[in-house]
Structures are given as C-alpha cells and as structure tokens.
C-alpha cells in the first residue's frame, strides 16, 4: 500500500480527510469564481463521491483510480468552479502505483487524462486552450514521478530488511554450529579420558588386588557366611575376591600396562587374610 494509504493509517481516516479538504476547498474556490457555474446538490455529490470511492483502494485500486478520474471529468464537464476536487484522484493514483503493475496504472491514467480533457472541453461556455490540458498532464506527471520514487524507496527498504534478516540467520547458524562442534569435542575428550582411566584402574586391580583396598572396597574382612555358588561359566575365567573376570581382560591389562609405562603402585604392607567385597 502506498505511503498515503497504509495499515498504520486507516483508509476511512484518509477518505475523511480528503473529503474535508475537497468540500472546504471547493466551497472557497466557488466563492472566488463567480463566472463559473454555482455549486448545487450534484456538485456536492460529485465532490463527496471521490473520497467515498477511496474506501475500496485495498480491494480494487485500478477501479478506484478510474472512478476518481471519471468523477473529475463529470465535475469539470458541468462547468463547476476549479478546486481541489482532483485530490481524490491524486491519492488513488499514488496508491495504485505502489501495488499494481505500472503499465496498467499508466494506461488507466492516460485514459483518465483524456476523459478529463474531454469533459473540460464539453463544459458549457468553456473555451479550450492548449495550456489547460498541458497543465493537467504536467500535474499528473509529477504525481506519477513522486509515486515511482516512493515505490522505489519502499522496494529498497524491503530488500535491505530481507538482507539483514538473512545475515542474522546466517550468524545464528554459525553460532549454533560452533557450539555443536565445541560440545562434540568436549564429550569426545571426556569419554576418551574415562576409557583410559578405566583401563589403568583395571590393570592396577589385576596386578595388585590389595591396591584396591580403599573407600570403595573392603579388604581383609572375614565373611562368615558361605558365598553363594557361582553360575557355571561357559568360558575359562580367573576368580578374584569372589568375582569372575570377564573374557578378554588380559588384553585390557596389557593395554593399560602399556599406557602407564609398566609402573607398579605401592603394595599393601600386609596381604589380605579374608575375602574382599564391595561396599
């Protein structure tokens, strides 16, 4: 929609303002032009018809533009005083340029200019001179040029807003990608560190069971009750502290020993005398 008729400025308010300007201006112009035909009921109806037609700008801008030019042609054809009756046609022209293909607008404008010139020529007692149609054409040309400038400016602002939104989305995507990469690297490093530490711990427990005596293991405690029978194992395993080692523990032990450089921790001062169990 045009700068004159946009969502922030209701069409009803625009039509009311244009109607007030046309009525007041036309009455004042008629008092200063006694040689023109005096205003009557039809003149007032034509003056108010233009602003009323503006109410349909959003639905049919071309039809409103054609109607506005027809009203101006009928007003001038009746020989009424010159005045701001053309304001509604100017508003319709500027609004149509913003939302309709310019070739169609220019075509309707040319036909409207021809109708206005013909109506002015057919007015009773009117002598048609060359400068009056030229003045009307110049006025319409200025309106068209101003409307095109407004349309170009609005298009530029719209493209700038679209480019800014695309840039914002691109930056947001880069931030999300960087956070995802950092999170992936952190998790991978933590999991690798846990794997290495678990392998070293398994190596230490395999080489020196008494080194596991600590907060998580209770050593040298005599178990009075007989331990429950172990389930039959399908593969050969070695027992320690009443538990069975899973198959493949020798390879994990060798890998842990390689990672720790073959170092051995400090041994307990006395060997355990009973079974160990986890707290």
Image (cartoon, rainbow, N blue to C red):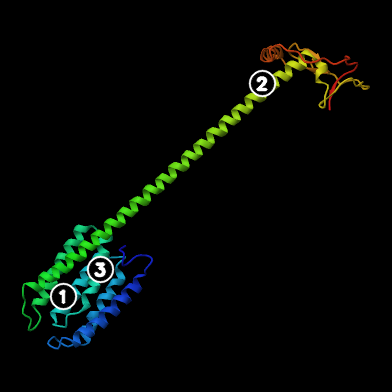
Tell me the number on the disc at residue 196. Answer: 2
* Left or right: 249, with 2 as reference point: right
Callout 1: 10 Å neighbours few (<14), some, many (20+)? Answer: many
Residue 193 appears anywhere in the view: yes
Residue 99 appears anywhere in the view: no
Q: Nearer the viewer, residue 90 or 51?
A: 90
Tell me the number on the disc at residue 73. Answer: 1
State the image coordinates of residue 20 (x, y, percent, origin top left). Answer: 30, 80
For the point 37% across and 49% down, the residue is 162
The residue that label 3 is drawn on is 92
Q: Quadrant of residue 252?
A: top right
State the image coordinates of residue 62 (x, y, percent, origin top left). Answer: 24, 65
**Mark whose residue sits in front, 3 or 2:** 2
Q: Earlier in the sequence, mark 1 or mark 2?
A: 1
For the point 69% across and 19% down, the residue is 199
Task: Give the vertical position of 28 relative to 204 (above or below).
Answer: below
Callout 2: 10 Å neighbours few (<14), some, many (20+)? Answer: some
């Amino acid at each position: 929609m045009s700068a004159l008729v946009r969502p922030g400025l209701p069409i009803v308010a625009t039509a009311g303002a244009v109607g007030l300007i046309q009525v007041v201006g036309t009455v004042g112009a008629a008092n200063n032009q006694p040689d023109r035909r005096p205003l009557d009921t039809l003149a007032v109806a034509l003056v108010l018809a233009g602003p009323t037609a503006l109410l349909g700008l959003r639905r049919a801008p071309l039809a409103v533009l054609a109607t506005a030019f027809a009203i101006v042609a009928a007003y001038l054809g009746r020989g009424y005083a010159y005045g701001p009756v053309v304001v509604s046609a100017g508003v319709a022209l500027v609004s149509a340029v913003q939302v309709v293909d310019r070739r169609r607008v220019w075509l309707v404008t040319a036909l409207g200019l021809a109708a206005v010139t013909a109506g002015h020529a057919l007015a009773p007692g009117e002598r048609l001179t060359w400068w009056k149609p030229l003045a009307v054409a110049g006025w319409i040309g200025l309106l068209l040029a101003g409307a095109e400038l407004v349309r170009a400016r609005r298009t530029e602002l719209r493209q700038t807003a679209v480019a800014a939104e695309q840039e914002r989305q691109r930056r947001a995507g880069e931030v999300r990608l960087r956070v995802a990469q950092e999170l992936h690297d952190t998790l991978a490093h933590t999991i690798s560190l846990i794997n290495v530490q678990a392998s070293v711990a398994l190596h230490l427990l395999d080489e020196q069971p008494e080194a596991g005596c600590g907060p998580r293991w209770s050593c040298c405690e005599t178990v009075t009750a007989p331990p429950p029978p172990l389930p039959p194992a399908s593969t050969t395993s070695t027992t320690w502290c009443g538990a069975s080692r899973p198959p493949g523990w020798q390879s994990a032990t060798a890998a842990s020993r390689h990672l720790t450089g073959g170092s051995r921790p400090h041994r307990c001062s006395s060997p355990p005398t009973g079974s160990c169990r986890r707290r």
